Image (spheres, grey):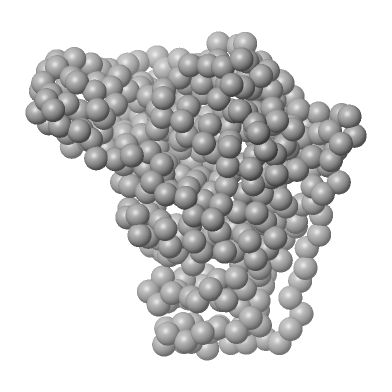
Amino acid sequence: MSSKRYDGPSFDAVDIIGIKRDKGTLSGEQIRWTIDAYTRGAIAEEQMAALNMAILLNGMNRAEIAQWTAAMIASGDTLDFSGLRNAAGASMPTTDKHSTGGVGDKITLPLAPLVAVFGAAVPQLSGRGLGHTGGTLDKLEAIPGWRANLSNEQMMRQLSEVGAVICAAGAGLAPADKKLYALRDVTGTVEAIPLIASSIMSKKIAEGTGALVLDVKVGSGAFMKSVDMARELAETMVALGKDAGVNTVALLTDMSTPLGLSAGNAIEVQESVEVLAGGGPPDVVELSVKLAQEMLEASGIRGADPAAALKDGRAMDVWRRMIAAQGGDPDVALPVARESEVVYAPADGVLVGLDALSVGVAAWRLGAGRARKEDVVQAGAGVRLHAKPGALVRAGEPLMTLLTDTPEKFDRAKEALADAVTIAPVGSRPASKLIIDRIS
Ligand code: URA
C-alpha cells in the first residue's frame, strides 16, 4: 500500500474556478493542488461545487482528465497484486469488471467466480446502491453471515486460494472521490463525463488490477441516456486505463430494460445462482459469458470456454468457496419478502417496452434500495418480472410481482410503474439489442 501527498505550489480556489468558468485549461499543478486541498478540507464545499458545475458545463480536455484522475489516485492508498500466487505457486493475472450501474445488474455475482475458474484473480471491489441502481454488496448481504469488509491480507489470501473476492473498497482508496462523489450527488453534477470517468478510473487504477473490462450502460436505467454520450465516456475511460498501464476495454450495453427477471437483493442472488447452475435468463447468461471472455482475453488467458464452465458446475464450485470464505452459507435459504402484489398486463399483444428506470424506482421504493447512505435495505424486497420485451402477453396475465415486508409501500411502487409497460400489436418487435458496441 502506498499514498503520495502533493508538495508543489499553492493556488487560490477562486482563480481555479474562474479558469474553468471562462473555458480555460487547468495545469497539472493546479489540478494536483485542487484535489489535495479539497481532500484536506482547505477548499470549501461551495467552492468545489462551483468548480464541478464549471467542469460539467465547459468540460475538460483529455490531459486535464488524466491529471485529475492521477491526483485522485494520489489522494489515498494503492494496492499491488503483482506478487499474487496461486496455491501451486504460479503467478496470477488480475482482471476486473466495472459496470456504470443499472437495474437488475447482478452480473458481478456469476462473473467473478466464472472468470476465476480459468486461473485469473478477480478482485472485485464493489459498492452499495444509492437511488434506483442496486449495489452488489447489498445483494450479497442477503446471504446470512456473508461479510463485505475484509482486510487487505484477507483479500489477498482469498484471491490466492479461491481466485475471486467481492468485497467493500477500503476507506483509504481514492478518498478524494468519496468526498467529491457525495458533493456531486447533492449539487446536480454527477452527469459530467470528465467527473464520472475520473471517479470510476481513479478507484480501478488505485485498486491495482492488471486488466479491466468496463460495462458502460446506455438507456433509461443508466446515467448515460444516449449511445453517443456512453461512447464518449467509454473512450475516455479506456484511454485513462491504457495510459495507466491497465489493459482496458469497454462494452456499451443496453439498460433500457432491466437485466434478467429480477431487481432486488435476495431475488438477484437467487437468479445468479440459477445462472451458475447452468440455467437462468438468456440475457444474464449472454452478458456474463461475453464479459468473462473479454476479462480473460484482456488478462492474456486464451482458449477459455466460460459458457461450458457455467454448464458443468466449475463456476458454481468457485462461487460456493467464495461465499463460504466470507462467512456465508451457500446452501442457506435466502430471505423472502412477507408481502407480494401482482401487476397484470393491461392488453393483448407484444411487450415491446419494460422501462428500466421505472422498475428500478419501484424496487427501490419497495425497500430494496436506500434514499440515504444510513438507510437499511430489505433483503427480500424487489420486483420479479414474468415477461421480458419480445414476449407475447394477454390482458390480465401477470407481468410482475412486487415484493416487500412493508405493504404500505405498494402504492408508491405502482405509481413508479404507471408508464413502464408498452404493449404493441402482434408482429411488433422491441428495438433494443443487448451488446451495442465494443471500444478498445
Ligand atoms: N460510478 C462512480 O463510481 N462514479 C461516478 O461518478 C458515477 C458512477
Up the image or down, 259 lies above or below 80; here it is: above
Q: Quadrant of residue 68?
A: bottom right
Q: Horizontal placement of 188 versus 213: left or right? A: left
Q: Quadrant of residue 90?
A: top right
Q: Horizontal placement of 416 versus 72: left or right? A: left
Up the image or down, 64 lies above or below 165; here it is: below
Task: Identify the image quadrant of the N terminus.
Answer: bottom right
Query: Horizontal and vertical percent for residue 414?
Result: 23, 30
Evaluate whether residue 302 shows in this view.
yes
Q: Residue at x 65, y 66 (%)?
A: 243
Up the image or down, 122 lies above or below 61; here it is: above
Evaluate whether residue 183 shows in this view.
no
Q: Quadrant of residue 177?
A: bottom right
Q: Residue at x 41, y 22 (%)?
A: 281
Q: Horizontal placement of 152 versus 370: left or right? A: right
Instruction: Name the one closer to the observer, 389 or 153.
Output: 389
Q: Residue at x 64, y 47 (%)?
A: 298
Task: Identify the image quadrant of the C terminus.
Answer: bottom right
Q: Residue at x 37, y 60 (%)?
A: 229
Instruction: Name the one closer to the observer, 333 or 434.
Output: 434
Query: Horizontal and vertical percent for residue 416?
Result: 25, 36
Query: Horizontal and vertical percent for residue 62?
Result: 53, 73
Query: Horizontal and vertical percent for residue 103?
Result: 40, 37
